């Protein structure tokens, strides 16, 4: 319950403060976090790892498809999504007249998480949502940064079949 209360309190902070907190926490506790993850993996060695994927979504920065890990959506544009790596370069990738736009983080594909909840351990789900390095995070974008990725239907950027449905 304490961990859930902590995550709920963290989610109430402005996004930039959430990022700063998590970066500071991880930096100060990296060794302990890794020991905890190793310990937890020992308790569930056969648990499958499923990375979080946003099906039908392409990163408009590096063209990673499907977008894996946290998804950042521009609140000022109807169809602009970037991965965590491109979010760090958002002012370059989404600059010019759009440089003052803010982004909303969508760490999970809630539909995918709902479908996977019977086979995925909560610890692995969190690791999949935020873990951006390692063998559990297959595939990388092309690094072109042109924002011309296409959805599943091949007719536009990012949203595929969900295009225009106000997700």
Image (cartoon, helix red, strand yellow):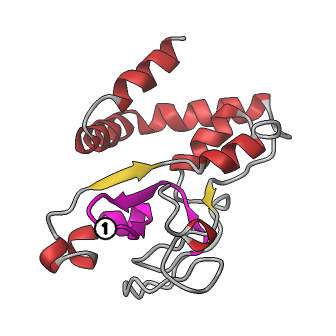
Query: Residue 56 colored magenta?
Result: no
Q: Is residue 79 magenta?
A: yes
Q: In the drawing, does residue 38 fall left or right of residue 157?
A: right
Q: Is residue 163 left or right of residue 26?
A: right
Q: In the structure shown, which secondary structural element does the residue marked by tag 1 occupy?
A: loop
Quadrant of residue 19 in the image? top left
Vertical arrangement, residue 143 with respect to residue 38, above or below: below
Mark 1 surroundings: few (<14), some (14-19) or many (≥20) residues within 10 A:
few
Q: Nearer the viewer, residue 162 or 41?
A: 162
Residue at 39% across, 50% down: 105
Q: Quadrant of the N terminus?
A: top right
The single residue placed furthest to the right in the displayed view is 46
- The x and y percentages for residue 12 are 32, 28
In the figure, 157 relative to 130: above or below? Answer: below
Establish if 38 lies above or below 10.
below
**Which image quadrant for residue 27?**
top left
Q: Work out which residue is located at the far top of the displayed protein and give it.
A: 1
Residue occupying image coordinates x 61% and y 86%: 154
Instruction: Name the residue at the front extreme.
Output: 165
Where residue 10 sits: x, y (%)? 35, 28
What percent of the width, then of the height, locates residue 76?
26, 62
Residue ID at (20%, 70%):
91
Q: How many marks?
A: 1
Q: Position of residue 48 (x, y in %)?
A: 80, 46
Disc 1 designates what residue? 77
- The residue segment tinted magenta is 65-88
The residue at 62%/59% (across/down) is: 53
């Amino acid at each position: 319950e304490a961990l859930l209360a902590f995550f709920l309190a963290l989610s109430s902070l402005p996004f930039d403060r959430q990022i700063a907190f998590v970066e500071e926490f991880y930096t100060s506790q990296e060794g302990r976090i890794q020991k905890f993850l190793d310990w937890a993996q020992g308790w569930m060695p056969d648990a499958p790892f499923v990375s979080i994927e946003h099906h039908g979504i392409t990163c408009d920065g590096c063209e990673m498809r499907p977008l894996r890990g946290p998804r950042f959506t521009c609140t000022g544009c109807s169809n602009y999504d970037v991965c965590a790596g491109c979010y760090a370069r958002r002012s370059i990738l989404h600059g010019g007249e759009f440089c003052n736009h803010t982004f909303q983080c969508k760490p999970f594909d809630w539909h995918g998480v709902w479908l996977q909840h019977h086979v995925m351990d909560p610890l692995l789900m969190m690791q999949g949502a935020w873990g951006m390095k390692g063998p559990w995070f297959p595939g990388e974008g092309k690094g072109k940064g042109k924002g011309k990725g296409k959805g599943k239907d091949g007719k536009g950027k990012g949203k595929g079949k969900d295009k225009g449905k106000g997700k």
